[in-house]
Amino acid sequence: MFLSNAGLFDQLLAARDGSVTARLAALPDDTARVREAFSVVFGREPDAKELRECGAYLKARSPEAGTKQLLWAMLTSAEFQLNH
């Protein structure tokens, strides 16, 4: 519940100097952002469907906002919570 509802978690994902969100948002394209996000959060490459869907999600948003929201979704996922 903390990960899903806490304002503090939102602040932790803010794009600041040296943050993962800022580093990913600065990458040249959405594909690179998705690949790096999966590497950082899950320690693996995204499969083709994940790459396509996450890329489409990022394409519809600004790099900073989309990256922050993608990281939030990944960190609150069952894969992260149960495997990491």
Image: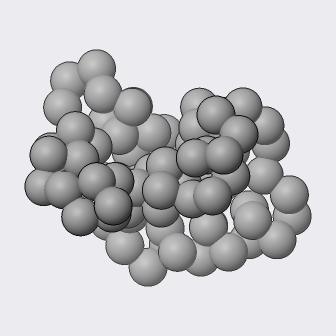
| Quarter assignment of residue 48 | bottom right
Coloring basis for residues: one colour
| Quarter assignment of residue 14 | top left
User: In the rendered image of this protein, does residue 28 appear above or below residue 23?
Assistant: below
Is residue 42 visible in the rendered structure shown here? yes
User: In the rendered image of this protein, does residue 33 appear above or below residue 52?
Assistant: above
**How many numbered badges does the structure rendering display?**
0
Image location (x, y in percent) of residue 19: 30, 27
Q: Residue at x 22, y 38 (%)?
A: 12
Q: In the image shown, does 81 or 66 lie closer to the viewer?
A: 81
Image location (x, y in percent) of residue 30: 56, 57
Instruction: Give the left or right position of residue 19, taking residue 35 as reference.
Output: left
Which residue appears farthest toward the right when viewing the image? 48
Instruction: Give the left or right position of residue 50, taking residue 22 as reference.
Output: right
Image location (x, y in percent) of residue 8: 14, 46
Image quarter of the C terminus: top right
Image location (x, y in percent) of residue 5: 24, 64
Is residue 70 visible in the rendered structure shown here? no
Which residue appears farthest toward the top when viewing the image? 18
Instruction: Give the left or right position of residue 53, taking residue 20 as reference.
Output: right
Q: In the image shown, does 47 or 78 lie closer to the viewer?
A: 78
Image quarter of the N terminus: bottom left
Q: Residue at x 72, y 31 (%)?
A: 43
Q: Residue at x 23, y 47 (%)?
A: 9
User: In the rendered image of this protein, does residue 75 appear above or below residue 58?
Assistant: above
